[in-house]
């Protein structure tokens, strides 16, 4: 039997990309003892290329003959290329439809082996793409364009069957990646299921295909020579590289071959790189080991390099290669802070061409407990020893592909339509490299103080790839709403939607959404409480003081602890304790990274984790018909498990806090907080106040960033607006609990029960917007539990209103790497917060406006 054993599709594009020379190497073998040279005495091989573009656009049957765009003819001279003894078919294709991640045009290649009678004895077929991968100084080019790699690393993982591949899971990955503006994937750290490559060809995803070579642990074996430098290991390494290339070589999605992962560097790598470059010069070679700048890599591809360092390399005139981070932004738990800083640099620095986030999915498995409850299980949950604990939970999605909030930030920094406000001009840039804006619809929405003032469709001229359009903001369709508004803050949001459905999403999908703040006609007014002539009542009851205004509201203050015991609105309990200073947060995975140098270790060593505030003094400073002023001095001291609170009273104060609570007859409580931390302390987790609400006060509305979780260093995607959510939905169920559910830049927030009774909170005076969170789980509980399902709800709702909150970090998860501007240094802080009762008859915006001077 004679059959087609292998083939290699190649295309060589003309300089202007208007035609392509097609070449297919074909290897014919026989199960009989027929000399290779004599096979073509009785057999012939043919190839044809078909354009499938119109196959699915008609209800009629596909016409193969009409879609035949190229016939390839056999050349008579057999070629021996690196052991590939085969034959070459050649042809030419005019006006080829090029493949890219933006436009994944594919053709069908059909190879036919015929006997002397013309009978087909064997046939092979696959989808192929015509594209060119090349290099220019500091640039990786696809079809002559310096595409930006907006990528992720992907392990093969299914939440139930582990490394077993299921096509529906692959498609789910691709759909979600494309919807999140991800255009590239690195197969970490091994060649993956063959169907994955076919799907990436179809959906359009650039790929780095990686050899299954990794040598973690050899650095601990000082008495052994590293395998990459051992001649005895050369054949094994070469075999893995060659097998990968030969299996996957016909896939258009692959733009680079990788020699493996974190395997140091040695002559075996040089040998493998040399083999690839000779066998397949149509693609690049990638390898990070040895410092990411060896001669074996065509791309500078560091791991977890800091922003300032990649910019330094890109600006190095002696380095001609582009820099693409093979791993960055370690997405472990509540992470991915600082990613916007990376993309600010990538978008503005020649020579930086993107990177691959680590990583796509949390690699936990669904496990059923003895009581029948299901949970995500990870290292050690299966009796496995040794294990890596939760270091397999580094994904942008949960194992079932539910997105983490951080994926919103990724989608934002990757978005292909950029919008900026430059003085009086709105600039809209199409950062696609191959697509115009023809298939897109632009929309605009204007919000004043969080509420919509107007919206509409934005008519723009066609924007070419890498082109831009400018328009004066005063001539835009939104200007009448701006001109007539007396809002304190006005934001314009421009969204870009797909007009037509694609393989990966329905029409109407938002690919880009950017918010810019406009200057306002309304001058921002200072804050002032209006008492409206109502009288305040106060009475001392033992160790407490009760302050009230008829039957409207009532606050009970404990003069021993300096904190509130209760706050009732219309007789309904709302706050049951708190309004005290807080500086601690439940540590995240990134907080714990770095062993003794980690933020968590620094906090524990300083005693911040066990900080308890003792009341040094508490006194009523003034009482009038309009107000009651209470001043409390707190001293924060660490409490050891072995010692009681009274035994620690003489401990060195870590933080001294002077709190002035002014209660007005209007029901307003103005909190003035002056915190003085010891200068010896490390950066603080947070600076703010903590209070506890009745569990029934579970409806939250806020004016700030949202609607999803966001933090000071991960908030670019979260637009400023008015959002609503209940407390239960605020919680983000990271597999390993820690700080979560925060919302950044909050101007005001209301906490109300089903009848609308509750508490309003806002910044006051010149204090900036707050970081806000509310949870059924206390900070101590989020710190205690090692799995989300272990969390036990408290008897109330813990609320944090933070003047400062430390960033999440994410450059990596094994060193303290929050950027300086997102740290909270141990220096004095002063800020104001306003609290007041609210009912269903009053909105949060009305409450906020009521404190502005006329």
Image (cartoon, rainbow, N blue to C red):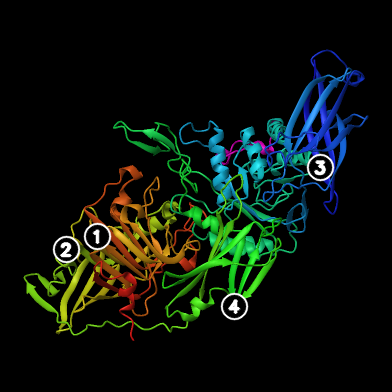
List x then y, in percent, for residue 82: 82, 32
Answer above or below: position of 474 versus 651. below
The residue that label 2 is drawn on is 572
What's the mark number on residue 11?
Answer: 3
- Magenta stretch: includes residue 774: no
Q: CA distance from mark 1 to mark 3?
A: 66 Å
The residue that label 4 is drawn on is 475
Among the 4 quarters of the image, the one containing residue 415: bottom right
Q: Quadrant of the N terminus?
A: top right
Q: Earlier in the sequence, mark 4 or mark 1?
A: 4
Around disc 3, counting alpha carbons within 10 Å, would you say few (fewer than 14), some (14 to 19), or many (20 or more)? many
Label 2 sits on a secondary structure element that is strand
Among the 4 quarters of the image, the one containing residue 503: top right
List x then y, in percent, for residue 294: 71, 49
Q: Nearer the viewer, mark 1 or mark 3?
A: 1
Around disc 4, counting alpha carbons within 10 Å, would you say few (fewer than 14), some (14 to 19), or many (20 or more)? few
Left or right of 726, for residue 436: right
Magenta residue span: 213-232
List x then y, in percent, for residue 821: 48, 68
Q: Earlier in the sequence, mark 3 or mark 2?
A: 3
Q: Residue at x 15, y 70 (%)?
A: 554
Disc 1 + disc 2, Cβ < 8 Å: yes
Q: CA distance from mark 4 to mark 3?
A: 49 Å
The residue that label 1 is drawn on is 753
């Amino acid at each position: 039997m004679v059959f087609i054993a292998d083939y290699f599709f190649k295309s060589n594009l003309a300089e202007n990309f208007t035609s392509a020379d097609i070449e297919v190497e074909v290897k014919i073998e026989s199960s009989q003892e027929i000399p290779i040279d004599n096979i073509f005495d009785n057999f012939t091989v043919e190839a044809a290329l078909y354009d499938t573009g119109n196959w699915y656009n008609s209800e009629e049957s596909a016409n193969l003959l009409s879609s035949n765009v190229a016939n390839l003819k056999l050349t008579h001279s057999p070629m021996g290329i690196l052991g590939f003894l085969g034959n070459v078919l050649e042809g030419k294709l005019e006006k080829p439809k090029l493949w890219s991640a933006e436009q994944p045009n594919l053709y069908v290649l059909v190879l036919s082996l015929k006997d002397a009678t013309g009978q087909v004895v064997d046939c092979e077929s696959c989808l192929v793409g015509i594209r060119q991968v090349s290099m220019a100084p500091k640039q990786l080019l696809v079809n002559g364009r310096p595409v930006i790699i907006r990528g992720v690393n992907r392990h093969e993982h299914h939440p139930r069957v582990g490394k077993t591949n299921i096509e529906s899971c692959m498609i789910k990955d691709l759909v979600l990646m494309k919807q999140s503006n991800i255009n590239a994937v690195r197969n970490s750290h091994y060649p993956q299921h063959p169907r994955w490559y076919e799907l990436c060809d179809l959906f359009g995803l650039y790929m780095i295909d990686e050899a299954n070579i990794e040598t973690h642990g050899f650095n601990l074996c000082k008495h052994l020579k590293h395998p990459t430098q051992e001649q005895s290991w050369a054949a094994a390494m070469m075999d893995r590289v060659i097998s990968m290339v030969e299996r996957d070589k016909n896939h258009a999605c692959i733009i680079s071959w990788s020699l493996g992962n974190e395997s140091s560097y040695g002559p075996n790598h040089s040998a493998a790189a040399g083999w690839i470059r000779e066998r397949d010069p149509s693609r690049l070679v990638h390898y990070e080991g040895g410092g990411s700048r060896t001669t074996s890599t065509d791309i500078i591809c560091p791991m977890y390099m800091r922003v300032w360092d990649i910019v330094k390399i890109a600006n190095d005139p002696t380095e001609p290669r582009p820099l693409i981070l093979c791993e960055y932004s370690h997405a472990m738990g509540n992470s991915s802070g600082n990613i916007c800083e990376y993309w600010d640099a990538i978008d503005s620095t020649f020579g930086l061409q993107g990177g691959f986030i680590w990583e796509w999915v949390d690699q936990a498995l669904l496990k059923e407990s003895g009581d029948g409850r299901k949970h995500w299980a990870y290292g050690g949950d299966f009796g496995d020893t040794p294990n890596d604990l939760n270091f397999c939970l580094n994904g942008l999605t949960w194992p079932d592909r539910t997105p983490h909030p951080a994926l919103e930030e990724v989608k934002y920094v990757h978005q292909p339509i950029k919008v900026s406000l430059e003085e009086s001009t709105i600039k809209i840039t199409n950062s696609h490299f191959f697509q115009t804006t023809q298939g897109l619809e632009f929309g605009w929405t204007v919000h004043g103080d969080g509420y919509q003032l107007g919206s509409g469709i934005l008519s723009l001229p066609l924007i070419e790839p890498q082109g831009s359009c400018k328009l004066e903001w005063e001539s835009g369709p939104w200007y009448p709403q701006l001109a007539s508004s007396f809002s304190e803050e006005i934001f314009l949001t421009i969204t870009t939607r797909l007009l037509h459905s694609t393989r990966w999403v329905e029409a109407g999908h938002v690919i880009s959404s950017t918010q810019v703040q406009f200057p306002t006609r309304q001058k921002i007014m200072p804050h002032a409480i209006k008492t409206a002539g109502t009288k305040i009542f106060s009475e001392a009851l033992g160790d407490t003081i009760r302050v009230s205004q008829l039957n409207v509201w009532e606050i009970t203050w404990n003069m021993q602890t300096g904190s509130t015991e209760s706050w009732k609105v219309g007789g309904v309990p709302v706050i049951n304790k708190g309004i005290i200073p807080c500086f601690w947060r439940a540590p995240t995975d990134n907080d714990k990274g770095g062993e003794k140098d980690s933020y968590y270790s620094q906090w524990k060593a300083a005693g911040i984790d066990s900080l308890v505030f003792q009341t040094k003094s508490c006194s009523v400073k003034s009482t009038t018909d309009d107000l009651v002023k209470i001043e409390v001095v707190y001293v924060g001291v660490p409490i050891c498990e072995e010692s009681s609170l009274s035994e620690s009273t003489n401990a060195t104060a870590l933080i001294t806090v002077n709190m002035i609570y002014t209660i007005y007859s209007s029901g307003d409580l103005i909190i003035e907080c002056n915190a003085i931390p010891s200068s010896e302390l490390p950066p603080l987790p947070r600076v703010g106040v903590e209070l506890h609400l009745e569990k029934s006060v579970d409806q939250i509305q806020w004016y700030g960033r949202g609607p999803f979780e966001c933090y000071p260093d991960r908030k670019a995607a979260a637009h400023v607006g008015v959002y609503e959510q209940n407390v239960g939905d605020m919680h983000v169920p990271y597999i390993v609990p820690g700080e979560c559910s925060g919302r950044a830049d909050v101007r005001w927030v209301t906490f109300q029960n089903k009848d609308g009774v509750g508490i309003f909170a806002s910044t006051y005076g010149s204090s900036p917007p707050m970081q806000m969170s509310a949870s059924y789980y206390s900070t101590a509980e989020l710190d205690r539990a090692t799995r989300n399902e272990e969390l036990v709800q408290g008897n109330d709702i813990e609320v944090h209103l933070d003047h400062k909150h430390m960033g999440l970090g994410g450059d990596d998860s094994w060193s303290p790497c929050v950027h300086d501007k997102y740290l909270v240094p141990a220096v004095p802080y002063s800020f104001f917060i306003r609290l007041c009762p609210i009912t269903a008859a009053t909105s949060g915006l009305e409450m906020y406006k009521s404190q502005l001077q006329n």
